[in-house]
Amino acid sequence: MSCIARRVLASFAAVAVFASLATAAPPVPQTPEQLQAHYDAAMAEADLAIEAIVAVPDDRRTFENTVLAIDDMHARLDAAIGMPLFMAYVHPDATIRDVSRAAYGHYGNWMVELGKREDLYDAVRQVAMSNPELEGENARLMTFTMRDYRRSGMDLDPEARAKLAAVEKEINELSIEFDQNIMADETVVFVTEDELRGLPADWLAARTQVDGLYELGMDYPTILPILDHSPNADTRQKIWLARKRRAKRNVAILEKLLALRAEQAAMLGYAHASDYENEVRMTKNADTVAAFYARLQPLLREKALKDHALMLEAKRSDTGDPQAQLKPWDFGYYMERVRERDYEVDSNVVREYFPLEKVRDGLFEITQQLYGIDYVPKQAPANAPLWHEDVEYYEVVDRNTGATLGEFFMDMYPRDGKYGHAAQWGLVPRKAWTDNSVQTPVAGVVCNFPKPTADQPSLLSHDQAETFFHEFGHCLHTLMTEAKTARFAGTSVERDFVEAPSQMFEAWVWSPETLPMLSGHYKTGEPLPADLLERMIAAKTLCSGMMDETQVFYGMSDQAFHTDADGTIDTTQVGKDLYAECTLFEPVDGTWFQSSFGHLTGYQGGYYGYLWSKVFAKDMEQRFEELGMLDPEAGAYYRKHVLGRGGTVDASEMLQDYLGREPRMEPYIRSLGIEVEQSDQQ
């Protein structure tokens, strides 16, 4: 899983207090005091803007000075606080992270209160009741604003609304605590050198030793080589168990969250939290999600049974035990062994052809050709350096117009206290002001790839290269938007569509047309051999059924957690039951995957969106496969019809417009190595 969980600062749009920030990324706070002062000033400006909107006389109230003015306020606010709040996830100074996290909590509570201000609601409602003549994005903004007020409880009486606000603030605070516990988790496993026998020498040399034992953390560059390549089953089991036992205190926090989310949904008239969350997504309700899984599971199970038989045979052959059973910590290891045995693909050899800088340069070249853009490296101001020396900073320029489209940061290596997965943050949203000036967007791309050593550069597995493309797909979505309002800029699409553009971009890591651009041996520069690529492509569907069944398990667990009417759930037992139902493994006692399942805050009730979006991604990439993966006309068409539109139209309408027909499930099913009828529809 690429773990994007693409993350955004909230589902609230916003932008800069100071005019100088309108076309440049806001500076990085250098001290806790500076961060707090910057945040406080931004919030004060936002409060003044709201008071000005409320103060407009009734006989002068318009869409522009009320509804659009609220979007203006959000646009300025997000630009001002985007960087300060982002520091909670990436800054190496724990005190700055703490101040940022506290500001994040304050902001969430402020948003709860803002959504329930009766005077502001009355102002917006007055505009709505006047039936202003609106079209396009403005009409959508009016509709969505009234919808959001309904969902925030403005139809409730004041007492019920106050109770709802208290519930939502507690949800906000517990969500931040849940995320923090994952990031702050310090789980380590100590093992002997003998227990690590068989792992690559460069990987071993990069590990920390304490009194003759190797100290292994839970970051991906540490654990994935063990799970994929350690011949010692006990070592694999130790690491797998430790990973599934992180942040145990989050079990109780999650179960409080589920009860509160159920209470919130009930107060607003929904059957459960999933229906509340999914009302504003493509599926609209939990029944549609259940129907999607019901249709998909039999197809995946058929492939998964074949995958499991192959892995089981490999383990029994390897161990010489005809009664051996496949365990979860065996999966990655035997998948790699089968890849080597049946396809002659050694992932450690493949890794040598994907140095990070080469992958980055190839990604840049591909997207420049497709979308008619250029990347210009930037230096941060001397008085406001970036948060870490590893961070890179770029400007994106449109070749045709010479205009700056936006800027982005890349923070690619793990370190203590940093967000531990891969994600993209929208730090500043695009906003077209009424004076025809434009606030350009800013994004942050965060990954955790192996750090370069004195002897070799950062070498990516092919999966990690795919993750890089995935997250950069989100970045492009943020930067290439042409939305006029902050509310619909960039990735502000339905949450169950947001992964589709980034998942589609993964296809370029597999194409013979583009792989030579992003691969080259780190010592010789020689391109990835054509015959090796052919074998990699032949192995692409290896264990696809089992892997996507794991995605079903996560998605169905999320649904089970959020479809209980009162939210009283034993999440560990539910997880065990669904693990047995959705996968071909037996549940493992003493584990609690949900405590470190970060998508349960932000994607709650919506994790199904990864597979839902993947169906669309596979369908959308067909145009490029037919016209050419580097075809600039295909790129321009996609930029116009998908990336540029942001959330200005419903995703279903956007898809049909881009495809010229209804979406089909068939390309996704075929990508798993399953033959289906061409007429299979989404």
Image (cartoon, rainbow, N blue to C red):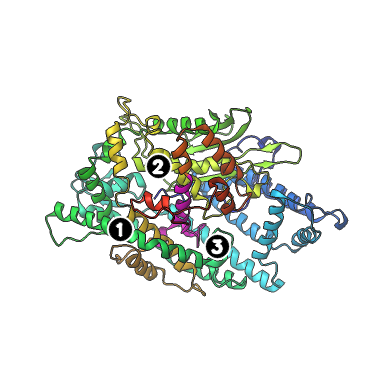
Name the residue: 69% across, 53% down: 141
Whether label 1 touches label 2, CB < 8 Å: no
Q: Residue furthest left?
A: 320
Q: CA distance from mark 1 to mark 2?
A: 22 Å
The magenta-colored residue range is: 594-620
Q: Is residue 355 left or right of residue 118?
A: left
Give the class, few, some or many, for how many residues have Cα within 10 Å of label 1's Cα (few <14, many ≥20). Answer: many
For the point 67% across and 61% down, the residue is 147
Say which element carries label 2: helix
Report the residue at 68% width, 35% height from top: 20
* Quadrant in the picture for residue 271: bottom right
Is 419 on the left or on the right of 346, as rendered? right
Q: Residue 259: x percent and y percent?
A: 51, 71
Amino acid type at mark 1 = Ala
Q: Which residue is mark 2?
A: 466
- The foreground one among 70 and 448 is 70
Q: Do tag 2 and tag 3 residues touch (Cβ < 8 Å)?
A: no
Left or right: 668 in relation to 121: left
Please provide percent x and percent y for residue 211. Answer: 24, 46
Pick whichever of labels 2 and 3 is earlier in the sequence: 3
Membership of 517 in magenta stretch: no
Label annotation for residue 278: 3
